[in-house]
Image (cartoon, rainbow, N blue to C red):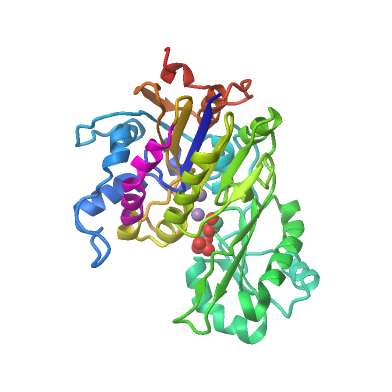
């Protein structure tokens, strides 16, 4: 029986989105601008990395071709392709993580998320009052759009002093709550997020996110890995649900469980940081049973480097991942299919600190699968449908499988 490995490099967009202008992102290109930045010396950092971006292994799978498909621009390196490759456009209205992942899993988001305006305060007064009342709080801090690392620097000390949690949002459909793991309490933060989850349901907010941190001063504040996302469940059965309904298992690595509100997820495995996450994913490639789906999210690209607008950091993270692609390929057995893709962009050369609307790469391989160009797919859902067909599941309602192009006997 076949197995499938779907690995999402969170925010690794490849530009070219036809509706980018609607999002204020015309010209954004995470991969293209890291590539160009490294060429121009913007990717150099003492002790970290320097020189042109070196993604030999992903290029070998067809990453350059995927970028050419997404952007229409010539790629300046001739590639040796051993994988199938293409690009996909998002049809869901949001450029956020749940929209991207749900669409990859065959369910584009058919409705508009609720968003908070970029004003101070950002939250409607009755919501703020309800959070304070039902959360039994002395008040809240923040109440604005912000970058999560910057806002704990700004309000961290006041938070410790007053016990008021720091509530903030972004261009995504999120309400994030930062609080100190010890002074406020981790469990208390999780409990508060549960209360707030219910309060924002009527506003159609995609996620309430706990953002715990440690440290005592502006210089020492640091977010911990105990982040927790409370997402609304997907509006229809996803690929994960379909796998589980057919009696197989979906092993979710990293944030995947949270993103799908734990629906259709048989087991969650986690690691702290991309490399530990990759170790966990490699382990799952060894012990996943026939028919299983291993669905992994590598969040550092987004959280640590994209949002922080750190070209050198993003480049180094990509290179570290790329160096280990041979380990991934070495674990593929006959009947397996691997797809590497992304859920949105987060161009580290772009203005602001938010995600960018972009097309995403589809590169993959499997013993016997053909090394073909699968072209520009009009929806991320084509990825999920391809995995579904590979696993022998009935077609879903959205997207068209390209499995016919890559299957060994095509
Ligand atoms: O700046 P931080 O807290 O990392 O926030 C980012 O993380 C959120 C969820 O992924 C996004 O909406 C973005 O605002
Ligand atoms: Mn994401
Ligand atoms: Mn993000």
| Residue 393 at x, y percent in the picture | 62, 23
| Residue 351 at x, y percent in the picture | 38, 58
| Residue 57 at x, y percent in the picture | 30, 40
Q: Is residue 225 visible?
A: yes
Spot the residue most to the top. 409
Q: Is residue 300 visible?
A: no
Spot the residue most to the front. 287
| Residue 255 at x, y percent in the picture | 57, 51
Above or below — where is 35 with respect to 61?
Answer: below
Question: Where is the N terminus found, in terms of image quarters?
Answer: top right
In the picture provided, is 387 more to the left or to the right than 143? Answer: left
Q: In front here: 122 or 363?
A: 363
Which residue sits at x=52%, y=80%? 215
Give the quarter of the image for residue 305.
bottom left
Above or below — where is 162 with respect to 40?
Answer: below
Q: Main secondary structure of the magenta part?
A: helix
Question: Where is the C terminus found, in terms of image quarters?
Answer: top left
Q: In front here: 297 or 67?
A: 297
Which residue sits at x=51%, y=56%? 271
In the picture provided, is 313 more to the left or to the right than 273? Answer: left
Identify the magenta region.
315-332
Which residue sits at x=61%, y=83%? 160
């Amino acid at each position: 029986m076949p197995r499938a490995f779907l690995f999402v490099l969170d925010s690794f967009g490849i530009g070219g989105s036809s509706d980018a202008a609607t999002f204020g992102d015309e010209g954004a290109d995470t991969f293209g601008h890291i590539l160009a930045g490294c060429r121009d010396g913007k990717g150099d950092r003492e002790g970290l990395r320097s020189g042109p971006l070196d993604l030999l292994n992903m290029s070998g799978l067809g990453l350059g071709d995927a970028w050419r498909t997404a952007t229409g621009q010539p790629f300046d390196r001739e590639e040796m392709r051993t994988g199938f490759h293409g690009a996909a456009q998002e049809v869901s209205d949001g450029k956020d993580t749940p929209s991207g992942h749900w669409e990859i899993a065959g369910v584009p988001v058919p409705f508009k998320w609720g968003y908070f305006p970029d004003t101070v305060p950002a939250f409607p007064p009755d919501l703020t009052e309800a959070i304070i009342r039902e959360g039994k709080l002395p008040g809240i801090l923040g109440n604005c759009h912000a970058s999560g690392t910057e806002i704990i620097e700004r309000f961290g000390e006041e938070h410790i002093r007053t016990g008021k949690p720091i509530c903030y949002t972004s261009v995504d459909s999120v309400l994030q709550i930062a609080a100190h793991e010890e002074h406020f309490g981790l469990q208390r933060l999780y409990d508060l997020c549960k209360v707030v989850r219910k309060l924002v349901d009527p506003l159609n907010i995609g996620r309430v996110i706990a953002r715990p941190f440690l440290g005592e001063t502006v210089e020492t504040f640091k977010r911990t890995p105990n982040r927790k996302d409370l997402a609304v469940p997907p509006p229809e059965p996803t690929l994960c649900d379909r796998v589980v309904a057919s009696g197989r298992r979906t092993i979710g690595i990293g944030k995947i469980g949270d993103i799908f509100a734990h629906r259709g997820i048989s087991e969650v495995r986690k690691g702290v940081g991309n490399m530990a996450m990759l170790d966990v994913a490699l382990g799952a490639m060894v012990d996943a049973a026939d028919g299983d789906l291993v669905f992994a999210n590598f969040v550092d690209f987004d959280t640590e480097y994209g949002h922080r607008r750190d070209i050198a950091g993003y480049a180094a993270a990509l290179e570290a991942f790329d160096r280990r692609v041979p380990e991934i390929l070495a674990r593929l057995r006959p009947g397996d299919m691997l797809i590497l893709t992304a859920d949105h962009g987060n161009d580290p050369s772009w203005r602001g600190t938010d995600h960018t609307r972009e097309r995403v790469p589809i590169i993959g391989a499997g013993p016997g699968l053909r090394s073909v160009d699968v072209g520009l797919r009009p929806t991320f859902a084509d990825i999920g449908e391809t995995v579904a067909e590979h696993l022998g599941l009935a077609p879903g309602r959205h997207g068209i499988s390209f499995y016919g192009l890559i299957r060994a006997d095509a």
